[in-house]
Image (spheres, rainbow, N blue to C red):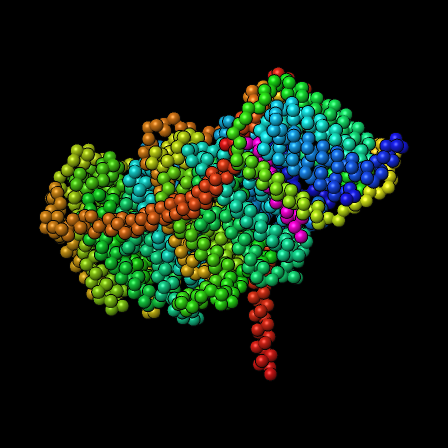
C-alpha cells in the first residue's frame, strides 16, 4: 500500500486544526476558519491522491497501532480500515464537508464566535473520519461518541438561546440511549466471539454463521440501536428536527450529509452480524421511520425542519435498504443523499441569510427573482430528492425500491413508492411556497442573493446532485458487497440501467413523483396560507405536532426517570440519611444527654465516681 | 541504601509544612510560594518517577526500607509497582493543582496551607507505603486535616452537619478497616507489618477460609465506607458540597482512592479464599430455618460470594446515586454524587476479579482523581465568583467565563464518559472486564454510565453554562492569568494524555494486576488441576 | 495478742477510710484538704510498717518522698484555694460547680 | 537511746504503746473529719496536728526515727501552720450547718464500705509477718541517708526541682493579678 501515512494525516489534521484553533487562534476569526478549511481540503486532496495510488480496493486494507492491550482476551487496536466503503465515505466526508466548510466561511462571517465554530467543525470532521476509518468496534464507538459530542456542541453553538441549549441536550441524551445499546451489543459480540476487529469478526461469522448462538439476533439488534440513535430512526428520531437549532451549515454537514449517515454506514460495515430476523426488524423500522417522517414533513412550516424531516425519511429509506439485505443501494443512496441534501440545506441557509434569519416559509414567497442562483440550485436539489430521472436521487432511490421489489417484500415496496410521492409533495410544497406566489412579508421583498463564497459551494454540490447517479458510485460499493451477474458499463447504459433492471420500480417511482408534483402545484403554487389543514382536519394537527412523540417521551421516559430520581432522592434523604444516620445520631445524642447529668461539676461526685472506678479496677485485679 | 525518590515526593510537602510553621502569618506571598514550590517539586519528581518506572520489572521499584520497631516488624518501607505508580503521579499533580487553587482561601491562610501540605504529604506517603503501619498512619495523617479544613474553611449553612457526618463516617470506616488490618496482622502470623512479606507469607501459609471470610468483610466495608460504597455514601456529596475546593479536590481526587487501593493491594492478594468461596457455609442453613424459601433463593444464598455482593452494591452506586444526582439542584452536590457514582465502576472492576477489570479499575482511579479535582476546582471558582452554586440561579456563564466554562464543559463530558478522556478508557475497560462475569450488572452499569450520566451532566451544562446570562452575574471575571489557568489546564491535560494513550498506564499496571488476579484465582485453578488429573487417571485406569 | 504487721495495716486502713469519708462528706474545701492529708498519712503508715516488717528501707525512702511531695502539694493547693476564694468568696464545694455543662 | 530502744523493743510495753497511739490516731482522725462539737476548720486543723503527732509515735514504734521527726517537722510544723494561716487569711467563719445531703452521705458510706471491704478481704487473705525482725537497721538514719544519696539520687533531685516549681507556682498563684 502506497502512502500509508496519508490516511493517518487525513484523520488527524482536523483534530490538529481544532486543537490549534482552541489553544492559539481563538481570537482571530479569519485565521481560524482558514486553518479549519485548509485541514479538510487537504484531507480531500490526500484522499484523492491515496485513491489514485491505491485504487478503491487496496491490497492491504488495514493499518493499526495498539491502543489498549490486555494480552489475549482483550486487545483494542487503533486501526484504519481502508476499503471501498471507507474510501468512498472519506471522499464524501471530506468533499461535501469541504464544500460546507467553505460555505460556512461566508455564512458565519458576522458571528463573533466564528473561530469557535470552526474549531467545533474540525472536531466533528475528525470524529466523523474516525467512524469511517475505524477497523474495530471500540474505535468506532469512540468516534461514535465523539461525533455525538461534537454535534452536541454544534447544535448548542448559540448556547444563549434556551431552545438551542435544550435541543443540544436532547440530541445528546437521545444519542446516548442508542449508544447504550450499541456498547452492550459490542460487549456481547466480544463476549461471544472474542474479538473486536471487523475483519476478524467477519471471518469468524463466515466460517461459522452460528457462532453467536442464540444471542445472535439480540446482539445484532443491540448494535443496531447505535444506528437507531445516530441515524435518528424511530423511536429515537425526535432529536433530529430539534437539532435544526444549530447554524445552517451544521444542519447541512451533520444532520444531512455525514453524521446521521454514520448509522447506515455502521450497519453496512457490520452487515455480517445480522440474522434474517434482525434484518427484518431493521427493514421495518426503517420503512416506518421513512413513512412517519414524510407524513410529519407535510405539515411543517419551518424551512429547515421540513428538510430535517425529509432527511429522517431518507435515512429511513437507507436503513430499510440495509434491512432488505441491500447495503449497496443503501450506501448509494447515502452518497447521493449527501450531495442533494447538503445542497438543499445550504440553499435553505442561503434563503435564510437572504431573509435575515427568518425561517417560516409562510413569510417568504416569490424568491426566485431575488435569489436566482439559490433558486436554481434549490430546484436541482429538490428534483434530485424527489427522484426525477436522470438526477442522482432517481437512481439511488430506484435501487432501493428495486431491492424491495426483488426481495418480494411488497409491503415495504408499496410504502417506499408512497413515500416517494410524499417526498415530492412536501418538497415542492416548500419549493412553491418559498420561491413562487406572492411575497408574504416585508423581509421577502427585501431579500437578496448571497455572496460568491456561499453560492460557489451550492453550484458544486448542484453539479454532483445532478450527475451523482451516473458516475459509477454504485459500482465502487460492489468491491465490498459483490453481487452476482454482469455490471452494465458505460454512461448511456448506466442512464437506462434502472429501467432494464427493475422496470416496475422505476416506472412506479416516476409515477409517484408525477403525482406528488401535480398535487403540490395544485395546492401550493398560489397559496398564501396552508390549505391542507382544512382538508385533513385532525390528521393535519397530528402531523403538525409530530404525532406527539415529544409529548409521549416527555410523559414516559423523562417522567419515569425523573420520578425514579425523585423517589430515590427521597429515600436517600429520608431513609438513608434521615433514618440511618438520624437514628445513629439521635441515639448518640440521647446517650450524651443522659450521661451529661453525671457531669455535675461537684467535686465530691467526681471523687465518689473515682472511688467506684478504682474499686472496680481493684476488684478485677485482685479477683482471683 | 539511598533515599528513594518516593520519600522525597511525600517528604517535600511535609517539610514545607514544618517550614511554614515558623513563617509569620502576614508574609502571605512567601507562604504561598513555599507551598506551591513544595508541591511543584513533588509533582515534578512524581513525573520523573513515572517516566523512569520500568513496566513489568519484578518486584518493587524505587524501594527503600528502614527498620523501625523490630519486635513488631514495623519498618519504613516505600516502593512502587504498577498498582500505585499512577496513583502517586496523580496524587502529586492533584496536590500541586490544589495548592494553586488555594488562592481562593482568604482567611487563616497559613494554617490552611499547613494542613493542605500535611494532607498532600500524607496521601502520597500512604500510597507509597509498603508497610501496613505507615500505610494506615499516613492515611490518617491526611484524613484528619480534611475534617479540620472542612469544619473551619467550609461554606454554606450545612457546614457543621456535613463536617460531623464526614468525620463520623470516615472515622468509622477507618476504624473498621483498622480492625480488619489488625486482625489480618494477627491472623497471618507473619509477625510483620511489611505488606509484601505478609502476602508472601499468605502464599505459603494461607489463612483458614473462615478467618478470611471474617476479615474480608471488615476490610471491604471499612475501605468501602472510605470510598463511599453504597449505602454508606451520603457523607460524600454533602461533605464535598461544603468543603473548600482544594480540600474537596484532594479528598475526592486522591485520598478517597486509598480505600480502593487498600482493597487491591492487601485484601485481594492476602484473602483469596474469601473471594472465591461462598459466604454462607451449608452448615449455616442447619442453624437457621431457611427451608421455607424457594429453592432458587436458597441456591442463590448458598452461592453468594463477596465479589458478587460487591457487584450488587455497585449497582447502588451507579444507578441509585446516579438518580440522586439527577435530582440535585446544587452544582456541587451534583458533582459530589456523580463522583460517588463513578466509584461504582471501580468497585465493579474490582469485583470482576479479572485482569481487565482490575486494570480498568486502577485506570478509573487515576482518571477520576484528575476529573474530581478538576470539577471541584471549577465549581470552587464559580462559587468564588457568584457565591452560589444553585443551578436555577446560574446560567449562561459561558459568556462571561469562556475559559472556565470550556473547562467545565470538558469536565462534564469526561464525567459522562466521553472518549478522549482517561475516564472513558477506564470505564470501557471495566465493562469489558465485568461483562464476562456479571453480564446483567454490566448492562445496568452501562445504562448508568451512558444514559443517566449523560442526563445529569448535560442538564448541569444546560443550567450553568447555556441559556441567557442573568443580569446579576455581569461582573464575573474569567481566570485571566497563567497561574490561575494552570491548575485547570494541567488537570485537563492529564486527563487527555491518559485518554489518548491509556497504555502509558495499563502497560505499567498489567503485570502487577496480573499477579493479583493469578493469586486470587490460583486456588480455583489448582482445584481444577486436581480434578483434571483425577479425570486423567480415571481414563488411564 | 502480739502486735504484728496486720495491726499497723488495720490502723492505716481505718485511717484511710476516715480520710476518704471526709473527702466525700465534708463540704469545706479546707477540711477536704485535711482529709486528703489523712489519707496520705495512712498510706505512709502502711509503707513504713511494710518497710519495718520486710526489713527493707526503700519503703521509708518512698515515705520521705511522699512527705516532700505532700508539702509541695499542700502549698500549691492552698494557694489555689486562696485564689479561688478571692474570686468566689467561698470555700464551699457546692458553690464551686462551674465545671458542669 | 539505749533505754528507749530497750523500752520499745520490749514486748508488752510496745504493744501497749501501739494501742495507745493507734487509738489516739484514729480518734483524732475521726475528729478531723467529723467533730460533733465544732465545725470550725481550725478545730479540724488542730486535731490533724494531734493525729500527726500520734502517727509519729507509731513511726517510732516501727523504728522509723528519722521519719517520725520529719513527720512532726514537716506536717505539724509547716503544713498545719500553712493551713491555719490560710484559715485565718480567708477569715472563714464557723461553717453554717447545711442540710445534710442524703446522696452525699449515701455515696460516702457506700464508697467507704466498698473500699473497706476490699481492704478487709486483702488483709484477711494475706499472710503477713507477725514478728518484726530484730533490729537489723540500728543506724536507721545513717542507712536511710545512704540509700537516699546513692540509689535514689535522681528522684531526690527531681523532688527538689518539684519543690522549686511548687514554690514558683505558689508565688505566681497568690499574686493579685496574673499578667
| Prevailing secondary structure of the magenta residues | helix
The segment highlighted magenta reads A602-624
For residue A193, above or below residue B93: below
Question: What's the residue at 81%, 44% (across, down)?
Answer: D131
Choose between A487 and A504: the one closer to the eye: A504
Q: Residue furthest top?
A: D176
Instruction: Indicate left or right for A351 with A88 as reference.
Output: left
Q: Position of residue A132 (x, y in %)?
A: 40, 54
Q: Is residue B385 magenta?
A: no
Nearest to the observer: residue A489 or residue A60: A60
Residue A426 in sight from this viewpoint: no
Q: Residue at point 22% right, 55% down?
A: A292
Residue at 87%, 39% (x, y): give it. Answer: D135
Q: Quick one: D18 or A546, which is closer to the camera?
A: D18
Q: Is residue A594 visible?
A: yes
Q: Quadrant of the N terminus of chain B?
A: top right
A150 vs A469, nearest the viewer: A150
Could you say where residue A508 lies in the image, as x and y percent from the top left?
A: 18, 62
Where's residue A572, x and y in %? 39, 46
Q: Position of residue B443 (x, y in %)?
A: 41, 57
- The total number of labels drawn is 0
Amino acid at each position: 500500500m502506497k502512502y500509508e501515512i496519508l490516511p493517518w494525516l487525513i484523520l488527524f489534521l482536523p483534530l490538529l486544526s481544532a486543537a490549534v484553533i482552541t489553544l492559539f487562534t481563538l481570537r482571530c476569526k479569519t485565521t481560524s476558519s482558514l486553518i479549519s478549511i485548509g485541514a479538510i481540503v487537504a484531507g480531500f486532496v490526500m484522499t484523492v491522491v491515496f485513491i489514485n495510488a491505491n485504487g478503491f480496493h487496496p491490497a492491504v486494507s488495514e493499518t493499526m497501532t495498539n491502543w489498549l492491550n490486555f494480552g489475549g482476551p482483550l486487545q483494542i487496536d487503533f486501526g484504519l480500515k481502508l476499503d471501498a466503503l471507507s474510501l468512498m465515505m472519506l471522499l464524501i466526508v471530506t468533499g461535501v464537508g469541504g464544500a460546507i466548510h467553505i460555505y460556512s466561511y461566508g455564512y458565519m462571517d458576522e458571528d463573533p464566535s466564528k473561530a469557535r465554530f470552526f474549531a467545533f467543525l474540525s472536531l466533528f470532521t475528525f470524529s466523523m473520519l474516525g467512524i469511517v476509518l475505524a477497523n474495530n468496534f471500540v474505535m468506532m464507538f469512540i468516534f461514535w461518541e465523539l461525533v455525538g459530542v461534537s454535534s452536541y456542541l454544534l447544535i448548542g453553538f448559540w448556547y444563549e438561546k434556551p431552545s438551542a441549549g435544550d435541543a443540544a441536550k436532547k440530541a445528546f441524551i437521545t444519542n446516548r440511549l442508542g449508544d447504550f445499546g450499541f456498547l452492550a451489543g459490542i460487549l456481547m459480540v466480544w463476549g461471544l466471539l472474542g474479538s473486536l476487529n471487523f475483519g476478524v469478526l467477519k471471518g469468524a461469522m463466515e466460517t461459522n454463521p452460528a457462532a453467536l448462538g442464540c444471542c445472535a439476533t439480540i446482539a445484532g439488534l443491540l448494535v443496531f440501536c447505535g444506528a437507531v440513535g445516530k441515524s435518528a430512526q424511530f423511536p429515537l428520531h425526535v432529536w433530529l428536527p430539534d437539532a435544526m437549532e444549530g447554524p445552517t451549515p451544521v444542519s447541512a454537514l451533520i444532520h444531512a450529509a455525514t453524521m446521521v449517515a454514520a448509522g447506515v454506514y455502521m450497519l453496512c460495515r457490520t452487515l455480517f452480524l445480522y440474522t434474517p430476523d434482525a434484518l427484518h426488524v431493521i427493514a421495518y423500522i426503517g420503512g416506518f421511520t421513512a413513512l412517519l417522517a414524510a407524513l410529519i414533513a407535510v405539515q411543517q412550516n419551518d424551512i429547515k425542519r421540513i428538510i430535517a424531516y425529509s432527511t429522517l425519511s431518507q435515512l429511513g429509506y437507507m436503513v430499510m435498504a440495509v434491512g432488505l439485505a441491500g447495503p449497496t443501494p443503501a450506501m448509494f443512496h447515502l452518497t447521493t443523499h449527501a450531495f442533494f441534501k447538503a445542497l438543499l440545506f445550504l440553499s435553505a441557509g442561503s434563503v435564510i441569510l437572504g431573509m435575515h434569519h427568518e425561517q417560516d416559509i409562510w413569510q417568504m414567497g416569490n424568491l426566485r427573482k431575488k435569489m436566482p442562483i439559490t433558486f436554481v440550485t434549490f430546484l436541482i436539489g429538490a428534483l434530485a430528492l424527489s427522484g426525477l430521472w436522470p438526477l442522482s436521487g432517481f437512481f439511488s432511490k430506484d435501487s432501493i425500491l428495486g431491492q424491495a421489489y426483488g426481495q418480494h417484500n411488497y409491503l415495504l415496496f408499496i410504502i417506499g413508492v408512497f413515500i416517494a410521492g410524499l417526498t415530492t409533495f412536501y418538497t415542492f410544497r416548500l419549493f412553491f411556497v418559498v420561491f413562487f406566489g406572492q411575497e408574504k412579508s416585508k423581509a421577502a421583498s427585501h431579500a437578496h442573493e448571497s455572496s460568491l463564497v456561499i453560492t460557489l459551494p451550492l453550484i458544486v454540490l448542484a453539479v454532483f446532485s445532478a450527475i451523482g447517479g451516473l458516475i459509477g458510485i454504485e459500482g465502487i460499493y460492489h468491491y465490498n458487497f459483490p453481487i452476482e451477474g454482469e455490471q452494465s458499463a458505460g454512461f448511456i447504459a448506466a442512464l437506462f440501467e434502472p429501467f432494464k433492471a427493475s422496470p416496475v420500480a422505476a416506472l412506479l417511482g416516476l409515477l409517484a413523483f408525477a403525482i406528488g408534483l401535480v398535487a403540490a402545484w395544485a395546492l401550493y403554487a398560489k397559496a398564501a396560507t396552508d390549505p391542507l389543514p382544512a382538508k385533513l382536519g385532525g390528521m393535519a394537527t397530528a402531523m403538525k405536532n409530530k404525532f406527539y412523540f415529544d409529548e409521549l417521551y416527555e410523559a414516559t421516559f423523562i417522567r419515569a426517570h425523573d420520578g425514579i430520581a425523585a423517589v430515590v432522592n427521597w429515600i436517600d434523604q429520608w431513609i438513608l440519611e434521615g433514618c440511618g444516620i438520624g437514628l445513629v445520631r439521635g441515639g448518640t445524642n440521647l446517650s450524651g444527654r443522659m450521661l451529661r447529668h453525671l457531669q455535675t461539676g461537684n467535686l465530691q461526685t467526681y471523687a465518689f465516681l473515682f472511688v467506684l472506678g478504682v474499686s472496680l479496677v481493684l476488684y478485677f485485679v485482685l479477683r482471683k | 541504601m539511598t533515599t528513594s525518590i518516593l520519600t522525597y515526593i511525600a517528604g517535600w510537602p511535609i517539610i514545607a509544612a514544618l517550614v511554614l510553621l515558623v513563617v509569620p502569618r502576614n508574609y502571605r506571598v512567601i507562604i504561598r510560594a513555599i507551598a506551591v514550590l513544595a508541591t511543584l517539586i513533588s509533582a515534578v519528581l512524581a513525573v520523573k518517577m513515572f517516566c523512569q518506572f520500568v513496566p513489568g520489572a519484578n518486584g518493587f521499584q524505587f524501594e527503600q526500607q528502614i527498620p523501625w520497631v523490630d519486635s513488631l516488624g514495623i519498618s519504613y518501607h516505600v516502593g512502587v509497582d504498577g498498582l500505585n505508580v499512577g496513583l502517586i503521579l496523580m496524587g502529586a499533580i492533584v496536590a500541586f493543582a490544589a495548592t494553586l487553587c488555594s488562592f481562593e482561601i482568604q482567611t487563616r491562610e497559613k494554617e490552611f496551607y499547613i494542613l493542605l501540605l500535611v494532607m498532600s504529604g500524607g496521601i502520597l506517603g500512604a500510597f507509597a507505603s509498603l508497610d501496613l503501619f505507615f500505610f494506615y498512619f499516613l492515611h490518617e495523617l491526611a484524613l484528619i486535616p480534611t475534617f479540620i479544613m472542612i469544619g473551619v474553611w467550609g461554606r454554606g449553612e450545612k457546614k457543621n452537619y456535613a463536617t460531623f457526618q464526614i468525620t463520623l463516617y470516615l472515622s468509622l470506616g477507618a476504624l473498621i478497616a483498622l480492625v480488619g488490618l489488625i486482625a489480618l496482622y494477627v491472623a497471618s502470623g507473619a509477625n510483620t507489618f511489611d505488606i509484601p512479606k505478609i502476602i508472601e507469607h499468605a502464599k505459603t501459609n494461607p489463612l483458614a477460609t473462615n478467618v478470611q471470610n471474617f476479615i474480608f468483610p471488615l476490610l471491604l466495608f471499612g475501605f468501602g465506607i472510605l470510598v463511599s460504597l453504597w449505602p454508606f455514601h451520603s457523607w460524600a456529596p454533602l461533605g464535598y458540597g461544603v468543603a473548600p475546593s482544594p480540600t474537596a479536590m484532594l479528598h475526592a481526587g486522591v485520598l478517597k482512592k486509598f480505600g480502593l487501593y487498600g482493597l487491591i493491594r492487601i485484601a485481594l492478594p492476602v484473602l483469596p479464599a474469601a473471594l472465591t468461596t461462598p459466604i454462607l457455609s451449608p452448615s449455616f442453613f442447619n442453624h437457621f430455618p431457611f427451608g421455607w424459601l424457594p429453592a432458587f433463593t436458597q441456591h442463590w444464598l448458598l452461592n453468594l460470594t463477596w465479589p458478587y455482593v460487591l457487584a450488587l452494591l455497585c449497582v447502588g452506586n451507579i444507578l441509585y446515586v446516579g438518580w440522586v444526582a439527577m435530582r440535585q439542584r446544587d452544582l456541587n452536590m451534583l458533582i459530589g454524587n456523580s463522583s460517588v457514582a463513578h466509584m461504582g465502576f471501580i468497585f465493579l472492576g474490582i469485583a470482576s476479579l479479572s485482569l481487565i477489570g482490575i486494570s480498568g479499575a486502577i485506570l478509573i482511579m487515576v482518571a477520576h482523581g484528575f476529573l474530581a479535582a478538576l470539577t471541584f476546582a471549577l465549581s470552587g471558582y464559580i462559587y468564588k465568583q457568584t457565591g452560589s452554586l444553585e443551578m436555577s440561579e446560574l446560567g449562561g456563564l459561558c459568556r462571561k467565563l469562556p475559559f472556565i466554562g470550556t473547562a467545565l464543559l470538558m469536565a462534564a463530558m469526561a464525567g459522562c464518559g466521553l472518549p478522549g478522556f482517561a475516564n472513558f478508557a477506564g470505564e470501557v475497560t471495566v465493562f469489558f472486564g465485568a461483562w464476562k462475569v456479571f453480564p446483567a450488572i454490566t448492562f445496568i452499569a452501562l445504562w448508568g454510565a451512558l444514559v443517566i450520566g449523560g442526563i445529569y451532566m448535560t442538564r448541569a451544562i444546560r443550567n450553568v453554562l447555556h441559556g441567557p446570562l442573568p443580569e446579576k452575574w455581569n461582573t464575573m471575571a474569567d481566570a485571566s492569568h497563567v497561574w490561575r489557568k494552570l491548575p485547570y489546564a494541567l488537570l485537563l491535560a492529564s486527563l487527555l494524555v491518559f485518554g489518548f494513550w491509556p497504555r502509558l498506564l495499563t502497560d505499567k499496571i498489567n503485570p502487577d494486576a496480573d499477579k493479583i488476579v493469578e493469586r486470587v484465582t490460583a486456588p480455583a485453578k489448582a482445584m481444577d488441576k486436581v480434578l483434571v488429573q483425577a479425570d486423567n487417571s480415571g481414563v488411564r485406569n | 495478742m502480739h502486735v504484728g504487721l496486720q495491726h499497723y495495716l488495720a490502723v492505716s486502713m481505718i485511717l484511710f477510710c476516715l480520710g476518704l469519708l471526709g473527702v466525700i462528706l465534708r463540704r469545706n474545701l479546707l477540711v477536704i484538704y485535711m482529709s486528703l492529708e489523712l489519707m496520705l498519712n495512712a498510706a505512709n503508715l502502711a509503707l513504713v510498717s511494710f518497710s519495718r516488717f520486710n526489713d527493707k528501707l526503700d519503703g521509708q525512702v518512698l515515705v520521705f518522698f511522699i512527705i516532700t511531695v505532700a508539702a509541695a502539694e499542700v502549698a500549691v493547693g492552698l494557694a489555689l484555694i486562696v485564689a479561688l476564694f478571692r474570686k468566689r468568696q467561698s470555700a464551699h464545694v457546692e458553690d464551686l460547680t462551674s465545671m458542669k455543662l | 537511746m539505749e533505754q528507749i530502744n530497750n523500752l520499745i523493743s520490749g514486748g508488752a510495753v510496745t504493744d501497749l504503746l501501739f494501742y495507745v497511739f493507734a487509738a489516739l490516731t484514729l480518734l483524732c482522725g475521726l475528729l478531723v473529719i467529723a467533730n460533733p462539737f465544732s465545725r470550725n476548720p481550725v478545730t479540724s486543723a488542730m486535731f490533724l496536728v494531734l493525729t500527726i503527732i500520734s502517727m509519729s509515735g507509731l513511726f517510732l514504734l516501727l523504728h522509723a526515727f528519722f521519719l517520725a521527726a520529719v513527720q512532726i517537722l514537716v506536717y505539724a510544723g509547716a503544713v498545719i501552720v500553712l493551713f491555719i494561716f490560710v484559715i485565718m487569711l480567708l477569715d472563714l467563719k464557723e461553717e453554717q450547718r447545711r442540710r445534710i445531703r442524703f446522696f452525699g452521705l449515701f455515696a460516702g458510706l457506700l464508697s467507704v464500705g466498698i473500699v473497706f471491704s476490699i481492704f478487709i478481704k486483702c488483709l484477711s487473705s494475706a499472710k503477713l509477718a507477725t514478728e518484726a525482725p530484730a533490729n537489723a537497721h540500728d543506724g536507721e538514719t545513717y542507712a536511710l541517708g545512704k540509700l537516699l544519696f546513692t540509689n535514689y539520687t535522681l528522684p531526690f533531685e527531681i523532688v527538689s526541682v518539684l519543690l522549686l516549681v511548687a514554690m514558683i507556682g505558689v508565688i505566681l498563684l497568690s499574686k493579685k493579678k496574673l499578667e
